[in-house]
Image (cartoon, rainbow, N blue to C red):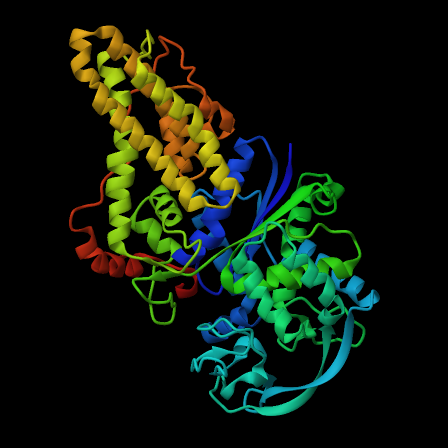
Amino acid sequence: MGRWVVCAAWPYVNAFPHLGTMVACIVSPDVFARYLRAKGEDVVFVSGSDEHGTPIEVEARKLGIHPKKLTDQLHNYVVKLYERLGVSYDNYTRTENEIHINFVQNFFMKLYENGYIYEKEVSLPFCPNCNIFLPDRFIEGVCPHCGEPRARGDQCPTCNRILDPLDLIDPHCVFCGSKPIIKNTKHWFFDLPKLSDKLMDFVMKHNLFSDSVKNYCKMWFKEGLKARSVTRDNSWGIPAPFPGASGKTIYVWFEALLGYLSATKEYFHRKGCEDEWLKYWVDGDSKTVFFIGKDNIPFHAIILPAMLMASGEGYVLPWQISSVEFLMFEGQTFSKSRGVGVWIDEALEIAPADYWRFALILMRPETRDLNFTWDSFYRIVNSELNDNLGNFIHRTLSFIYSRFDAKIPKAYDFDDSDKSMLCKLSFAPKNIGSLIENFKLKSAAEALLEFSSAGNQYLNDKAPWKSIKEDYKSASTTMWVAANVVKSLAILMAPFMPHSAEKVWGYLNLGGSVHNVGWDEASKANLREGHVINKPEPIFQKLPEDFVKTIGERLREVRIKLKRPELA
């Protein structure tokens, strides 16, 4: 049995996750973690709310409240949304907790003691009107690389280049709009160049890293790794532990990366086995997998491994980084300020969680930027889920319920068509599982649909509603085969659509939860003759014909209805 840590990128809680974040960092890792558990692997699935740093402080200042009050409200809100979405975190925590804070401070003191942290006086933008330094998102200006007029002091939202506040052209304070002056201050830096050769060797020779991960890192290596400031002058964050660093906080990106470790530690702390977490982060047989957006690649492929190396504690380095390209919304970039996109709480008011989970996996931008459209969502729900998958399951179970007295019929002699369908049944779990293991989740979802489509074609060809009058044994055999395909589909659906899979399992009346059934069980046609099923209901419902035409108005109604924490 393998040992895994499935790590989902920590979303800032200054806003709610939108569809792009949902597919990259929420649904995708959940599909992977659920699959691993079904395979019998030892899995810890962690993430949490990234609640420190300038994004939170900016939002809190705009609302006139303390950052802690804001993050308390937003964290509790998104936790409930993730529960509705069916995300199976083992520990979804937050960075404002004692275990994380202590872990980060102790970790950085270890880097300091190992000679990887040094202090240096630097010149930074300072707003004389607000009387504060302007790190990261306290400052905006024109990107020197692409000309984006609202680039931030940490990263450009358009070209995704990592920036320094001094890089910006025509900068201004985000709070008062004033032009900053340059003022000297002291900061502590992580000596990244000291690890340059090791990092390049690790990334470029990694057997599993995709070309997109390696190509993203090539730019950093080509330009030469630079020392990175690990401290900031903003007040909301983890106090820097270094001698003489009073008033400084740890840069949110450095401390949030360590959240994967501290969340694992916290999980086992709650279980009463304090040191068990080390098996997952120090044992060489453990595998750590990170699900992120492409703009976060350098932090996970370079910064995190560098910190783990510098600690000298023998932590396992990333086994795989599953990054995706950007999901666009109707041809535009998701934007909270411009109201472009759909956010998780809005999505769950418009359609059930499983509809979103499966649709987003089918739209997963694995190799290039893709575009979410309401037309695509409508087609996936009505054609793929309802007419294909749901139709096969319901027509099979309802036929058995009505024509075989709700009992699994007997299998007699198999003809070539029966044998072919049973062969597909035995092959589907291996095929879909292999695609998931290779992080081709979109292809895995498509393979699931192909399997159910084959089931529909099998029923159409066999026409048991006709043969039951003329050749009862043939009809009985057909429905035994079809019922076993339904059982297999319930297991294979579970990572993608946990709520719907549980419904199907309940109709089959097989006892317990489908999420406790091994993946390999899906390859077995072993339903017992005479087993009584429960009365089935349709698994999915079609979206109304005018859905695409009226969704704009529906979305406006939803936004008025929702009572979000920041509006309370």
Q: Quadrant of residue 273?
A: top right
Q: Quadrant of residue 381?
A: top left
Residue 71 appears in the rendering: yes
Residue 11 horizontal/vertical position (percent): 51, 59
Q: Nearer the viewer, residue 501 or 333?
A: 333
Residue 491 horizontal/vertical position (percent): 43, 29
Locate the N terminus and report the quarter of the image it occupies: top right
Position of 349 with respect to 511 (left or right) is left
Is 46 drawn above or below residue 51 in the view shown? above
Residue drawn at the location 20% of the way across and 19% of the way down: 463
**What is the count of numbered marks?**
0
Q: Nearer the viewer, residue 196 or 28?
A: 196
Q: Nearer the viewer, residue 231 or 166?
A: 166
Is 57 drawn above or below residue 40 in the view shown? below
Is 485 drawn above or below residue 351 in the view shown? above
Position of 284 with respect to 11 (left or right) is right
Locate the C terminus and report the quarter of the image it occupies: bottom left
Residue 235 appears in the rendering: no
Residue 324 horizontal/vertical position (percent): 47, 56
Q: Quadrant of residue 329?
A: bottom left
Residue 330 horizontal/vertical position (percent): 29, 62
Q: Nearer the viewer, residue 353 or 327?
A: 327
